Image: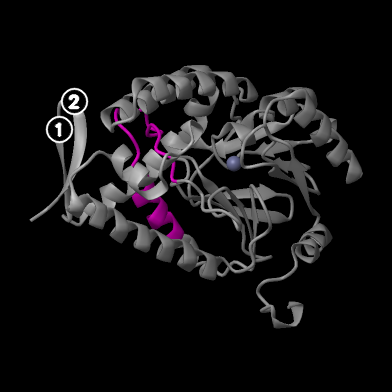
């Protein structure tokens, strides 16, 4: 019942209306992905700023244009595009917008090469994903299907030329608005939160989402070093940092705005802890691959989810290995997790 709703769980329409009073417009743009629409944000003022731009498609561009027009501005007037992270549902149209409007593009300096070399890095990401899938027990059939799916989706992305590289902890000045740049890796290695301390408001990208947990997707490290990210370990560190911030409103990359980030983070951490214990029990019952663990938890997952669930399991085994509760051994080219002691 609405009466019983806590004050922190405010109606999202009301919250977004209040954001508009601060000159911030949420622009939900369609994507071809299961996650649904991506939220871009137009920040009025000088510079006229767009946070994320949506995936590259005619439909998304048309809707981005008309939604910007709905705020009384036009896409051609955009002065600055700010990138929250490297995923294609957020960056696909950045270059299109920048070329049309002459806008500058701001993103983390350490992500700039990754963003500029989109094609090359997408190949490398796919290679990493395939080799991880094979090493962790996913069949070559499924791995190859996922690779070709990824190649198909790549058209929704594009290279991004960063003209205003940002430093973690630095300040992005937007006229009288100041956004603190906070690197919060986990969901992706380049996740960045932009924090307006004066208004107690943050742009979160996919660092936290209200309706679903942000997948700690394994990927290549941003610095180009070999191997993979320890995405869940990184994500937990990032969430712990965000938890301490006096955020009143976080505007996310998907779904509703977040007005209760501490409670949300606690909920995500509690779910994770339960999953960690479950994975430990599954491994203790019988040593097995990460994919076999995923199947034990989620059953026969859809092919498209195979890498997501694998990332999730590997993330948890990273933590279990750090705590010396589980170890990894190799058997016939497969990585097997077994209990310690
Ligand atoms: Zn996203």
Residue identified by numbered label 2: 333
Left or right of 129? Residue 205 is: right
What residue would you read off at disc 1?
330
Q: Is residue 65 above or below residue 201?
A: above
- Picture quarter with ligand 1: top right
Q: Position of residue 317 (x, y in %)?
A: 27, 48
Q: Quadrant of the C terminus?
A: bottom left
Q: Is residue 240 visible?
A: no
Tell whether 280 sits left or right of 218.
left
Range covered by the magenta-colored residues: 216-240
Mark 1 neighbour density, 10 Å: few (under 14) some (14–19) many (20 or more)? few
Q: Which mark is residue 206?
A: none
Marks 1,2: beta carbons within 8 A: yes
In which image quadrant can residue 291 be found? top left
Point out the residue furthest to the left here: 341
Q: Residue at x 65, y 48 (%)?
A: 254
Q: Is residue 293 above or below residue 58?
A: below
In front here: 315 or 118? 315
Q: Secondary structure at mark 1?
A: strand
């Amino acid at each position: 019942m609405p009466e019983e709703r806590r004050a922190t769980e405010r109606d999202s329409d009301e919250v977004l209306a209040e954001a508009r009073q601060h000159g911030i417009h949420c622009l939900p743009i369609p994507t071809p992905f299961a996650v649904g629409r991506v939220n871009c944000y137009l920040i009025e003022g000088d510079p006229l700023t767009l946070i994320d731009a949506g995936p590259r498609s005619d439909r998304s561009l048309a809707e981005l244009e008309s939604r910007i027009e709905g705020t009384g501005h036009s896409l051609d007037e955009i002065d600055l595009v700010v990138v929250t992270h490297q995923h294609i549902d957020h960056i696909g149209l950045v270059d299109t917008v920048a070329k049309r409007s002459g806008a500058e593009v701001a993103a983390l300096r350490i992500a700039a090469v990754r963003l500029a070399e989109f094609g090359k890095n997408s190949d490398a990401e796919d290679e990493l994903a395939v080799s991880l899938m094979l090493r962790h027990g996913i069949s070559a059939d499924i791995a190859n299907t996922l690779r070709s799916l990824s190649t198909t989706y790549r058209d929704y992305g594009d290279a991004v030329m960063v003209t205003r590289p940002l430093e973690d902890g630095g300040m992005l000045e937007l006229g009288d608005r100041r956004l603190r740049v906070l690197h919060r890796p986990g969901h992706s290695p380049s996740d960045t939160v932009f924090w307006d301390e004066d208004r107690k408001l943050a742009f979160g990208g996919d660092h936290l989402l209200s309706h679903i947990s942000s997948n700690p997707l394994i990927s290549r490290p941003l610095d180009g070093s070999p191997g993979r990210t320890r995405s869940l370990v990184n994500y937990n560190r990032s969430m712990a940092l965000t938890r301490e911030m006096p955020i009143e409103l976080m505007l996310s990359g998907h779904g509703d705005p977040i007005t209760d980030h501490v409670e949300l983070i606690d909920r995500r951490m509690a779910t994770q802890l339960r999953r960690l214990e479950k994975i430990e029990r599954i491994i203790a019952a019988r040593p097995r691959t990460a994919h076999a663990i995923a199947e034990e938890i989620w059953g026969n997952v859809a092919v498209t989810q195979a890498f997501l669930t694998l990332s999730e399991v590997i993330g948890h085994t990273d933590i279990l290995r750090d705590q010396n509760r589980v170890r990894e051994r190799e058997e016939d080219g497969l990585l097997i997790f077994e209990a310690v002691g």
